[in-house]
Image (spheres, rainbow, N blue to C red):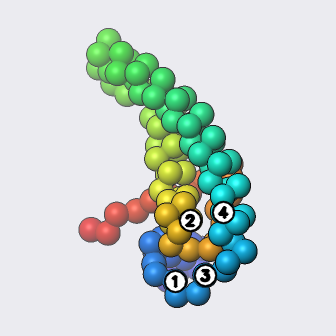
Amino acid sequence: MTQGTPALGQLFLFEQDAGRFELLIRIVYWILIGIVLWVYGVIAFVCLFIQWFHILILGRRNQTLSDIAKGYLEYLVHVMSYVYIMTDRRPDILPVSVRVYEEA
């Protein structure tokens, strides 16, 4: 790895150890993450709807609308391992800048 290149970590790994107290905190986190995902999802859906018309009329995509939809999907993937009880590592409640890569 070259200097300045961020370390990549696999999101969905099995972890043997699990905290019982974390299960109680997870309930509150699920609610908060769910609210954020719902609001962000509605905004992303509206952007996709506008994007559809933008493509239909102008024949090209709008970068801002695309970035909002991309941000929603990245946040969704970012919180999945915690929401599906695969890890005790808590994600941020509000969306943060993350990148999702697909192995070629």
Q: CA distance from mark 3 to mark 2?
A: 12 Å
Q: Please tell me whether mark 2 sits on a helix, a strand or a loop.
A: helix
Q: Which residue is mark 2?
A: 82
Local SS, label 1: loop
Element at label 3: loop
Q: Amino acid at mark 1?
A: Glu
Residue drawn at 27 percent across, 68 percent down? 104
- Marks 1 and 3 sit apart, C-alpha to C-alpha, by 7 Å
Query: Badges 3 and 4: C-beta atoms under 8 Å apart?
Result: no
Which residue corresponds to mark 3? Answer: 18
Mark 3 and mark 4: span between their CA atoms?
A: 12 Å
Q: Judge the density around disc 1: few (<14), some (14-19), many (≥20) Cα neighbours within 10 Å.
A: few
The Cα atoms of the two marked residues, 4 and 1, are separated by 16 Å
Task: Look at 32% across and 12% down and name the residue there.
Answer: 57
- At label 3, counting other C-alpha atoms closer than 10 Å, the crowd grade (few under 14, some 14-19, many 20 or more) is few
Q: Is residue 43 visible?
A: yes
Q: Is residue 95 visible?
A: no
Q: Earlier in the sequence, mark 2 or mark 4?
A: 4
- List x then y, in percent, for residue 70: 46, 43
For the residues carrying marks 4 and 1, which lies nearer the camera in this image?
4
| Measured Cα–Cα span from mark 2 to mark 1 | 11 Å
Marks 2 and 4, how far apart at CA: 8 Å
Q: Residue furthest bottom?
A: 16
Q: Are marks 2 and 4 in contact (CB under 8 Å)?
A: yes
x and y percentages locating residue 7 in the rendered image: 54, 76
Mark 2 or mark 1, earlier in chain:
1
Q: Which mark, residue 15?
A: 1
